[in-house]
Amino acid sequence: MMCGPGGAGKTTYAKRLERDGWMRLSFEMEFWDRGITTMPCAEVVAEVAADLKARLLRHVAAGNDVVLDFGFWFRRQRDEFRTLLAPHGIVPETVYIATSLETILSRVGNRHGRGADDWPLSEQTATEYFERFEPPTPEEGPLEVVR
């Protein structure tokens, strides 16, 4: 489970795993594939989340390695996926991309909305995301912190 606020570097890390044969699941990719290029309404987000969960469980059942290129900004979201995977004997690792706000703001300024992994964020929105983010703790389960 990739974890970090917008602009932290989660997708860059997840794409490395994808090149190594992992299946990468991403809200942004799914939105883009559906022709959605701005933040969708809650109903669409819920529909995409259900589709991604179903795909995750199919991949897990097939024995595939999967990286969830989500934000997992809140512990409750991380716990939800731990609960989803527990019946399958899987204890997911959280990969927390710990990045400073300064670095994040320098990155989001280079986003132009040209693709699924180029989702534009204003400095104000990126700052709000950073401030609301709940960093994971080792008490939650396996954790790798990338700086």
Image: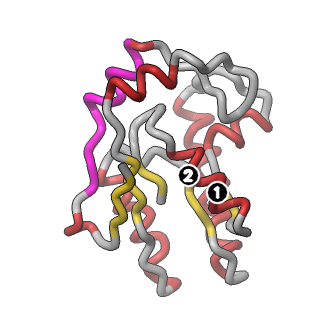
Bounds of the magenta segment: 124-136
The residue at 56%/43% (across/down) is 46
Residue 130 within the segment the image draws in magenta: yes
Give residue 13's mark: 2
Residue 137 in picture, x, y percent from top left: 22, 60
Residue type at tag 1: Arg
User: Which residue is situated farthest in the bottom direction here?
Assistant: 89
Is 68 placed above or below 127 here?
Answer: below
Task: Please tell me in which quadrant of the rendered image residue 127 appears.
Answer: top left
Give residue 134's mark: none
Disc 1 secondary structure class: helix
Q: Residue under circle 1?
A: 16
The residue at 42%/21% (across/down) is 105
Is 138 placed above or below 76 here?
Answer: below
Distance from disc 1 to disc 2, alpha carbons, whole Å, reads 5 Å
Residue 25 in picture, x, y percent from top left: 65, 54
Q: Is residue 142 left or right of residue 66?
A: left
Task: Please tell me in which quadrant of the rendered image residue 59 appears.
Answer: bottom right
